[in-house]
Image: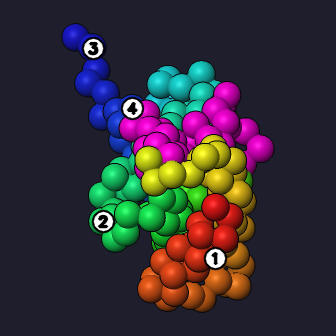
Amino acid sequence: MARKESITKDDIIQAAFAILQEEGIGQVTARKLAAKANCSTQPIFRVYKNMEELTEELFSRACDFFHDYYAQFPRQTVTPFVNLGQVYIKFAGEHKNLFKFVFLSDERFGRSMYDLVNGSEGFVGREIQAATSQGCSNASGLFMKMWIFIHGAACMTLTGDYDLSEQETVQMLKEAYQSFR
């Protein structure tokens, strides 16, 4: 009779995700992961060919985490791109290591920045449609300007240089939208 596996693939990815959240992707090593999952490195390499394969799955899980975070965030305004900006900036502040891994990594496993933010739910596409329906003649161009602004603000949270309240953030994003429009 075959021995029952006590460490599952889900156990491994959960432990890896916990390390990622707490310490960053650079600390997700086979040895540290084995310690976190209470196993040897053998089960890790039984499930994954190598650490790069595990990192790619971890990247997908981190993207899903962001998309769930975005989907659950309450919409506070009808001004296009404001909710997107709020979510992105707040995510960077609350989940620094995940933000760095997903949005500041050199390796995105074949996904563009647009794909990462838009997700399968079409978050960005909906914002572009909303801007178009509100009379914006070049909503895609407006998105690019807003995105540069939003991404810069989010990156400022990583260094502690962004200290605006939620209300101030909403106001700033609304003003940016109007000025870029």
Sequence-wise, the earlier of marks 4 and 2 is 4
Which residue type carries mark 4?
Answer: Lys
Q: CA distance from mark 3 to mark 1?
A: 51 Å
Which residue type carries mark 2?
Answer: Pro
Residue 74, position as x, y percentages in the image: 30, 65
Q: Which residue is mark 3?
A: 2
- The correct choice, above or below, for 137 with respect to 176 in the image is above
Segment tinted magenta in the rendering: 105-132
Asked whether 66 or 7 is in front, the reply is 66
* Residue positioned 51% across, 52% down in the render: 135
Which quadrant is home to the N terminus?
Answer: top left
What secondary structure is found at the residue carrying circle 2?
loop
Foreground disc of the pair 3, 1: 1
> Do we see residue 10 in this rendering?
yes
What secondary structure is found at the residue carrying circle 1?
helix
- The correct choice, above or below, for 159 with respect to 44 in the image is below
